[in-house]
Amino acid sequence: MEAPKVTVNVAVLDNDALQPALRKGELDIAFTHTNQFAQPDVTLELLRKDEFVVYCASTHRLARHRSITIDELAQERFAVATSAVGAFGSLLSLRQAFHQRGLPAPRIALASDLVMFKLRAVASSDLIGVALKGNVHPFATQFRLKILPVKGLDWIRPAAVAYRKDAYLSPAARRFIDILKATAREASRV
């Protein structure tokens, strides 16, 4: 153990709350998506690129399609992360795609930040899920889920660690950032 006396407090927050908490000094570092967090007083270090996907139960009527249009998705009900509902959430890209085609906003039927709960709910219902590919793909076979090939929805967001530019950053926080970067590099090789 490198630092046995260090205490780490991990909070899961929507960017609507995360960004002000970091800027006020309530947080030392934040793991976030860069296109939603860029500020002149914040340093961002790229860790990886996250791909979001749309998925459903393998028994869902759309699961058999080789290609899905955004118009087809407009008829569906969605399961999303609670944080996806906010102004910076992952659902924003889907809302924008719907809006550009003159479609009504996606109908959210389930919002929860519990990944396994959402996966199981989608697997046993007619809901369409929206999540990180890394959260869906490893469980697709086990829960009988199908990632849907949606035309016109390329959904990649850079993920980074953020911290205040001119604020003190402890050696433990700097070490934690190094661990995050090393973990991201290792995961990208898999």
Image (cartoon, rainbow, N blue to C red):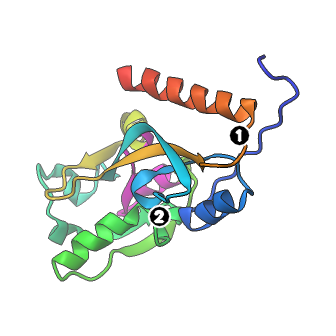
In the displayed orientation, state which residue is furthest to the right: 5
Report the quarter where the N terminus lies: top right
x then y, percent, for residue 56: 32, 54
In the displayed orientation, state which residue is furthest to the left: 66
Q: Amino acid at mark 1?
A: Leu
Disc 2 versus disc 1: nearer the observer: 1
**Which of the numbered marks, if any, corresponds to residue 108?**
none
Please rate how many residues cluster around mark 1, counting C-alpha atoms within 10 Å: few if below 14, some from 14 to 19, many from 20: few
Name the residue nearer the viewer: 25 or 121.
25
Q: Is residue 122 magenta?
A: yes
| Residue under the image location 73 percent in, 43 percent down | 168
Q: What span is colored magenta in the figure? A: 118-135
**Which of the numbered marks, if any, corresponds to residue 169?**
1
- Using the rendered view, name the quadrant where residue 189 is placed: top left
Inter-mark Cα distance, 2 to 1 = 29 Å
| Residue under the image location 15 percent in, 77 percent down | 101
**Which of the numbered marks, if any, corresponds to residue 84?**
2
x then y, percent, for residue 43: 53, 47
Q: Is residue 5 visible?
A: yes
